[in-house]
Image (tube, rainbow, N blue to C red):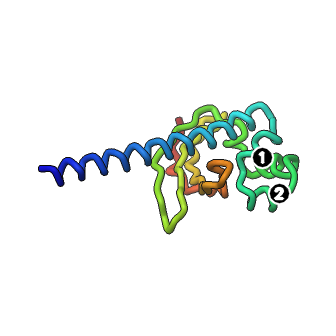
Amino acid sequence: MRKWMMGVALASAMAGSAWAQGTEIEGVIGSQIEAFKSDNFAEAFEFASPNIRGIFRTPENFGRMVTQGYPMVWRPSEVTYLELREENGSYWQKVQIVDAEGRVHVLDYRMLETEAGWKINGVQLLESVGVSA
């Protein structure tokens, strides 16, 4: 009985830790999207990983990439967080975004934990099922 209780306590602690981690990750993604909505590319750039910041070098370059390549992230009408998963040491947060025209997009955010907290280390646009909201 004692082993079972210790197992339950350990599983609960791990689930709580994963939930907290997921909440932090969702907060980072949500904060970046809010910054995009107000065209605050400097703030949005702060949520990018050092690698992404090195690639784009300035908030203006980063903003241009987002507005041209990921307009659904720049001006979403609805954001829904799906599953968070770990693959080969990387954390991926799947996010469903409905754009201003009602088209549904599913994106996979690669997350990186840094000394400064979670950062976005890349975004992949996944195949949509062609569903409209």
Q: How many marks?
A: 2
Q: Are marks 2 and 1 in contact (CB under 8 Å)?
A: yes
Name the side, left or right, on which 72 lies relative to 26: right
Depth check, front residue: 110 or 106: 110
Q: Going 75% across and 58% down the picture, which residue do you hit?
A: 50
Q: Residue at the far bottom: name it.
A: 88
For label 1, the SS is helix
Read off the residue under disc 2: 56
Can you tell which quarter of the image residue 90 is in?
bottom right
Read off the residue under disc 1: 45
Mark 2 and mark 1 lie on one chain; the one further toward the N terminus is 1
For label 2, the SS is helix
Is residue 29 shown above or below 38? below
User: What is the three-letter code of the residue carrying label 2?
Assistant: Phe
Depth check, front residue: 39 or 120: 120
Mark 1 crowdedness (10 Å alpha carbons): few <14, some 14-19, many ≥20? many
Q: Going 83% across and 48% down the picture, which residue do you hit?
A: 64
The numbered disc on residue 20 is none
Q: Going 23% across and 50% down the picture, which residue do you hit?
A: 6
Give residue 71's position: percent from left, percent from top: 72, 44
Give residue 11's position: percent from left, percent from top: 30, 50
Is residue 78 shown above or below 68? above
User: What is the three-letter code of the residue carrying label 1?
Assistant: Phe
Give residue 121's position: percent from left, percent from top: 66, 57
Can you tell which quarter of the image residue 101 is in?
top right
3D distance between C-alphas at marks 2 and 1:
9 Å
